[in-house]
Image (cartoon, rainbow, N blue to C red):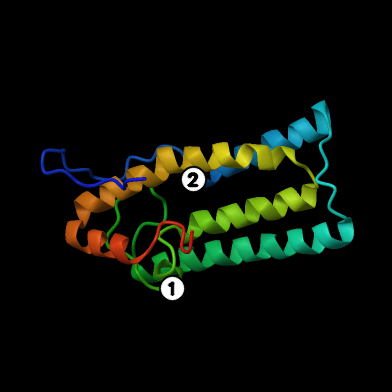
Amino acid sequence: MSEPTSSATEPRMRSPGVRIPPPVFLLVGVFVGWILERRVHSLPLHVPPVIGEPLGTLLLGAGLAFTYWGVLTFRRAGTAIVPMRKATSIVTTGPYRYTRNPMYTGFTILYLGLTLLMNSVWPLLFLPLCMYALLRFVIRREERYLGQAFPEEYAAYRARVRRWGAF
């Protein structure tokens, strides 16, 4: 998949143009999965609680920790955490050394933890749609904006660090 590039003919962007806060995409997937599990038809994961509950709790904690690490790193750098606002710099420290999207990675890990704790297949069925929406309506806009706002610095960072880390 090719990554967005900035064009000299494109108008200068003042912000990424993100309209929906990124966690909303994943919260909707979990919520719809929960409604379907409780009100329509139960689709259990069939993971024994002795495994599912501790693993789900571990993933929940890891997702929260990774997300918090990303937020804290942005705060220390003094740049906008909310993608509806203007960025003041490219952050390349902390978790941003490993992935360009540690907060979204953290949200996804958290989502998987909630899925295990719910012991339901439904949220897993919605995860690809949630990830596509996050990519389409948030990440691509952020990347286009950062490519315009910090052309050389962002291009070098993008060449060095993958979007989803090792994936």
Q: Is residue 5 above or below residue 154?
A: above
Circle 2 residue = 22
Q: Is residue 67 above or below residue 33?
A: below
Q: What residue appears at the point 69 percent right and 41 percent down from the top-left corner? A: 123
Asked if the residues shown at circle 1 and circle 2 are in contact, with their CB atoms under 8 angstroms apart, the answer is no
Quarter occupied by residue 34: top right
Q: Secondary structure at mark 2?
A: helix
Q: Is residue 76 above or below residue 1?
A: below
Measure how far apart labels 1 and 2 are at the Cα level: 20 Å
Tell me which label, 1 or 2, sits earlier in the chain: 2
Callout 2 amino acid: Pro
Q: What residue appears at the point 23 percent right and 47 percent down from the top-left corner? A: 5
Residue 67 position within the rendered picture, expressed as x and y whole percent measured from the top left: 54, 61
Callout 1 amino acid: Gly
Residue 62 position within the rendered picture, expressed as x and y whole percent measured from the top left: 63, 65
Q: What residue appears at the point 33 percent right and 40 percent down from the top-left corner? A: 17
Circle 1 residue = 94
Q: Residues within 10 Å of mark 2 (few under 14, many from 20)?
A: many
Q: Is residue 101 left or right of residue 125?
A: left
Quarter occupied by residue 121: top right
Q: Which mark is residue 149?
A: none
Q: Residue furthest top?
A: 40
Q: From the image, which quarter does the N terminus lie in?
A: top left
Q: What residue appears at the point 46 percent right and 57 percent down from the top-left corner? A: 164
Quarter occupied by residue 32: top right
Q: Residue furthest front?
A: 1
Residue 25 position within the rendered picture, expressed as x and y whole percent measured from the top left: 54, 40
Q: Is residue 44 left or right of residue 12?
A: right
Q: Secondary structure at mark 1?
A: helix
